[in-house]
């Protein structure tokens, strides 16, 4: 009789644990110090980085175009001005070409603080999901 009662008790406790899902217990979320609730997920386009290729390429094109304007000292000033402006524009073009889209997730942590996480891949979680933060990344809980 004691064995049957003990077996029923063990099965009852195991059933309660498995009802939460594999590997999860009723108090797991409450015990996780690095867990939080997703508040918001947005897609953001980030500008890339400029570099020497954009600056030099733009300066050459700008200088050539500036050289076509005026004569004498005006031609020299137009060439220099074109090179400077072209370098700036070339750098900006390179930033746009190397831009990328990232996903920004805003999480309210267990301690009440708000943290923001950024990743290139589309996240699998949505607002209201419980996630665990490790280093600078999030994991679905």
Image (cartoon, grey):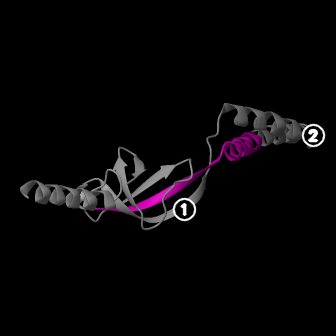
- Coordinates of residue 39 in the picture (x, y in percent): 43, 67
Q: Quadrant of residue 81?
A: top right
Is residue 101 part of the magenta span, yes or no?
yes
Say whether residue 131 is visible: yes
**Vertically, is 85 above or below 115?**
above
Crowding at label 1, few (<14), some or many (≥20) Cα neighbours within 10 Å? Answer: few
Task: Tell me the element at label 1.
Answer: strand
Query: Residue 41, image x and y in percent?
Result: 51, 62
Label 1 vs label 2: CA separation?
A: 47 Å
Q: Which residue is mark 2?
A: 68
Task: Report the magenta residues as a range.
Answer: 84-110
Q: Nearer the viewer, residue 52 or 30?
A: 30
8 and 129: which is toward the camera: 8
Left of 130 or right of it: where is 97? right
Give the left or right position of residue 120, taking residue 11 as reference: right
Q: Up-down: is 50 above or below 42?
A: above
């Amino acid at each position: 009789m004691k064995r049957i009662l003990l077996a029923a008790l063990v099965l009852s406790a195991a059933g309660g644990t498995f009802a939460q899902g594999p590997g999860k217990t009723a108090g797991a979320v409450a015990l996780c110090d690095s867990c939080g609730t997703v508040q918001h997920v947005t897609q953001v386009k980030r500008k890339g980085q400029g570099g020497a290729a954009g600056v030099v390429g733009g300066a050459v094109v700008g200088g050539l175009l500036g050289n076509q304007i005026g004569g004498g000292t005006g031609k020299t000033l137009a060439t220099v001005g074109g090179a400077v402006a072209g370098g700036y524009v070339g750098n900006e073009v390179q930033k746009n070409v190397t831009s990328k889209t990232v996903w920004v997730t805003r999480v309210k942590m267990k301690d009440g603080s708000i943290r923001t996480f950024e990743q290139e891949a589309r996240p699998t979680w949505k607002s209201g999901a419980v996630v665990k933060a490790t280093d600078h990344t999030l994991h679905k809980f």
